[in-house]
Image (tube, rainbow, N blue to C red):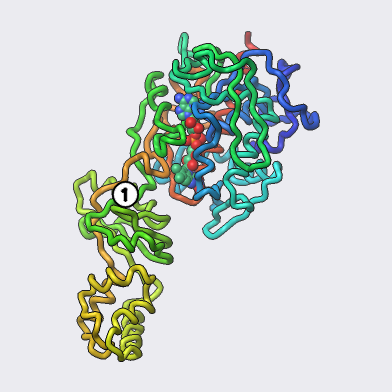
Amino acid sequence: MTAGGRRRGVRRGAGHGRRPGPGRSRPAEGRPSQRMPQPDPAEVLVVGGGAAGSLAAIAAAEAGARVLLLEKMPRLGSKLLMSGKGRCNLTNRAPLDEFIAAFGETGSLLRNVFHRFFVDDLCRFFEAQDLSLKTERGGRVFPESGEAAAVVDVLMRELDRCGVMVRPASAVEAVLIQGGAVRGVALLRRDPVARGQGAPGARAAPAGAGGRAQEVQPTIPAPPTIPARAVVLATGGASYPQTGSSGDGYRIAEALGHRIIPPRPALVPLVLAEPIPREWRQVTLRHVRVTLLADGGTLDERFGEAFFVRDGIAGPAVLPLSRRAGAALEAGRRVEIILNLKPALSAEKLDARLQREFAAHGQPGSPWAILKQLLPLKLIAAMLVQWGIDPQMRGSEISREQRRRLRELLQSLRFQVRGLRPLAEAIITAGGVATNEVDPRTLASRHVAGLFLAGELLDIDAETGGYNLQAAFSTGWVAGRAAAEHVTARGSQT
Ligand SMILES: Cc1cc2nc3c(=O)[nH]c(=O)nc-3n(C[C@H](O)[C@H](O)[C@H](O)COP(=O)(O)OP(=O)(O)OC[C@H]3O[C@@H](n4cnc5c(N)ncnc54)[C@H](O)[C@@H]3O)c2cc1C
């Protein structure tokens, strides 16, 4: 299967009865006029306007379904906007097996999904919309502009082009079922549109030149329930709830009979037992090695950047350790991390380097001058305290034992891990809808006909590097396409 981006120009609306079959494109009809009215009720409802929901809506509309996208927040893509520190690490160029391995044991569902929509498909989708991409260290793919907003703009434009109706500020409370099949959704009562505060006629605002996600005006009258024959649930996880993903989907799916693997933080800072000197919080440690230990044995090890936060440590080299750290803490084990600030040097080479530095610094006050050669300035004062040395010493006066102690501090700085920061601060939520309860080829619920599940809501989570967004886009695309096929198949039967 190929990316939706190759099926451009497909427009639903009038002539809806004749839809392109799976894998077949309609001939391009040219760029459609903006926002044609959509008189008929939606066939597919997509709940959640993040990465997964947006692509689901686009894929379903391109396959010929009438689609309404319901988003709880006033705008789409809030989490996408903050992804990759505002640069949005869209995906990763790792080969398929390596890619799936980044999800650990939660990755098995994805083999089928990635077979249908993977990295090349996603890149083609964005590049077809004139979004240039670049690949950085570790195969990480970003928009060339370095702006996550450009990604959201493309999604908004495509939703508009495909004729997807978008209704923001519309929180779904439940999926309605009858006879084991989807009948629609119920909106949360405090939905302002449902309370009659919106004006008639919903539409997706086009992306503007400002490069930000656009406010989308809620404008159709909204009954508290919306009928449809298929629902794609793409409400995200429960981390960073200010973006709208606050775990609603777990409650909705559970009420439909789905098993929820308890949500827990993944890719989250570690809380340390030791107090962190204030100045240390202003330093990014580059090219360091972080080793995670449980009861003294090595569990995992990462290389890269780390930085201290108020009560702990974060950064790309630390976050991937959090899953194992959490499990070890839960098992009651003593968890520690060791920071190697000079991982490129063997112990012997570092020792030789220290001896050279000590010989070169013959003046009183040498410890400070020596550490200045080895560490970021802001680490030095606290490190001198840890070293326990008289700061007025000359290099030649430093003993072998004091040299050994410094070597240890530089290569084996040890901290005890007391816990993890809370789920709200996690980059990703581990846990979610059990993946053995969805069909891996379509992401259809095994409990409710016409229900499809996508994105972080599912029990899938990976390391940093663009894997999570690719999973959200891919599952969204597969679920959206399958939802369209579901309503098409049912439509042709009746
Ligand atoms: C700070 C940060 C940085 C990140 N950076 C990266 C990165 O660079 N690369 C990467 O691969 N991953 C990154 N991630 C992870 C990635 O952003 C997520 O895994 C991905 O966005 C999940 O997409 P989703 O569509 O499943 O969920 P979300 O993006 O969370 O979207 C879910 C949507 O559903 C809506 N919703 C929720 N409940 C309801 C309801 N009841 N009714 C209607 N709508 C509802 C929400 O408002 C939200 O808009 C980052 C995450 C964070 C927090």
Residue at screen point 64% across, 23% down: 203
203 or 228, nearer to the observer:
203
Determine which quarter of the picture holds residue 70: top right
Vertical position of residue 72 compared to residue 345: above or below: above
Q: Is 254 in front, or is 179? A: 254
Which amino acid type is shown beneath numbered disc 1?
A: Arg
- Residue 472 is left or right of residue 13, and the answer is left
- Quarter of the image holding residue 376? bottom left
The answer to whether residue 467 of the structure is visible from this angle is: no
Vertical order, 180 against 242 (above or below): above
Q: Can residue 293 be seen in this view?
A: yes
Q: How many labels does the image show?
A: 1
Rendering coords of residue 332 (x, y %): 19, 47
Q: Position of residue 111 (x, y in %)?
A: 51, 40
Q: Closer to the camera, 397 or 62?
A: 397
* Residue where numbered disc 1 is placed: 324
Q: Where is residue 49 in the image (x, y as percent from the top left)?
A: 54, 31
Q: Which residue is drawn at 20% across and 75% down?
A: 388
Q: Is residue 394 left or right of residue 100?
A: left
For label 1, count other residues whose C-alpha is less than 10 Å away and answer few (under 14), some (14-19) or many (20+). some
Residue drawn 40% across the image and 57% down it: 317
